[in-house]
Amino acid sequence: MLETREESDAMVPVGEFDSLAGANEHALVVLSMNLACWIHLDPETRRFRLFVEPPYAVAVTEELEEYRREQAEFRIRLDPPVFRSGIELALLWCAVLLTIYLFQQRDPLIAERFCNSSEALLGAGEWWRPFTALFLHGDGPHLLGNLAIGGVFCVLVAHSFGPWRGWWLILVSGTLGNALTAWWHAPEPFRSLGASTATFGALGLLVGLGLRNAWRSRSYREMRPLMVPLAVGFVMLGWFGAGGGDPNGNTDVLGHALGCLAGVVLGVVAAPRLLREKTAGRPHAPA
């Protein structure tokens, strides 16, 4: 309650605030201690002062200090360090995909030898196939769709995790997605190719980072910065199609889902290191 100067003279001030809202916030702490308090507007300073009865001044002051410390810790956000967007690596990625696609046109057997295959991976032990499949495409539209959609997500990941670390996580999530898909389909024969598993892995990395931020701060408001890029990404996916799949052009929905899931897990795991880099005050290296 607001009191006059005369009424507050017998009380002890325990806080001074610029706004009535701030005074009320701290008054709630006093009330939670089952103690009475008073708020007085100083006509000279135009600041709000919080008063309590003299016997409780020390205890209330200590409680308010503890409350401020808790609030300061709660308000710390796991804002990922802002890295360069890694445009150079994104352009290199595009150049590599285009070059490999040109080689595919000259030798159609490249896709057969290096695509993701449940038989080759689990039967023949050709462990590299889940990785090499990320660089192969079935046709021109398939390639262009992955370049357009994947470029958006991969730049966002590089901006959030750092270019080198971000691209490493993207490739690992795509490789894991392909490997899990091949394992899921075994022993049935299954083949797939395309960078879209890595694209969905990039999407998962962004979601995983946002989830870790939200969990740490106990507030899903931390997911809000991701809403616009994710919405744009899903719109682009709707326009250009999900892309990716087997060599016959069928979409590998399971591979996309598992790539995204792998990205979410890796994003959650990688987030604490970003926090340590920030809190340690070290320069944020690209890797």
Image (cartoon, helix red, strand yellow):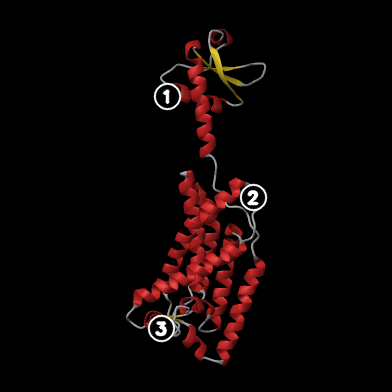
Q: Quadrant of residue 21?
A: top right
What is the three-letter code of the residue carrying label 2?
Arg
> Mark 1 or mark 2, which has the lower sequence index?
1
Res. 240 in view? yes
Reply above or below: 203 against 10. below
Which residue was labeled with disc 3? 120
Q: Secondary structure at mark 2?
A: loop
Q: What label sits on residue 1 in the rendered view?
A: none
Res. 236 in view? no
Q: Secondary structure at mark 1?
A: helix
Q: What label sits on residue 282 in the rendered view?
A: 2
The residue carrying pointer 3 sits among few (fewer than 14), some (14 to 19) or many (20 or more) residues within 10 Å by Cα, namely many
> Mark 3 or mark 1, which has the lower sequence index?
1
Q: Are marks 2 and 3 in contact (CB under 8 Å)?
A: no
Q: Residue at x 50, y 61 (%)?
A: 205
Q: Are marks 3 and 1 in contact (CB under 8 Å)?
A: no
Front-most of residues 241 and 67 = 67
Q: Residue at x 53, y 26 (%)?
A: 65
Rounded to the nearest whole Å, what is the CA distance between mark 2 and mark 3? Answer: 45 Å
Left or right of residue 7: residue 45: right
Which residue was labeled with disc 1? 32
Q: Residue furthest front?
A: 125
Image position, residue 266 (x, y; %): 48, 61
Q: Residue at x 47, y 82 (%)?
A: 115
Rounded to the nearest whole Å, what is the CA distance between mark 3 and mark 1? Answer: 66 Å
The residue carrying pointer 1 sits among few (fewer than 14), some (14 to 19) or many (20 or more) residues within 10 Å by Cα, namely few
The nearer-to-camera label among 3 and 1 is 3
How many numbered discs sit on the rendered protein? 3
Image position, residue 227 (x, y; %): 52, 56
Left or right of residue 146: residue 257: left
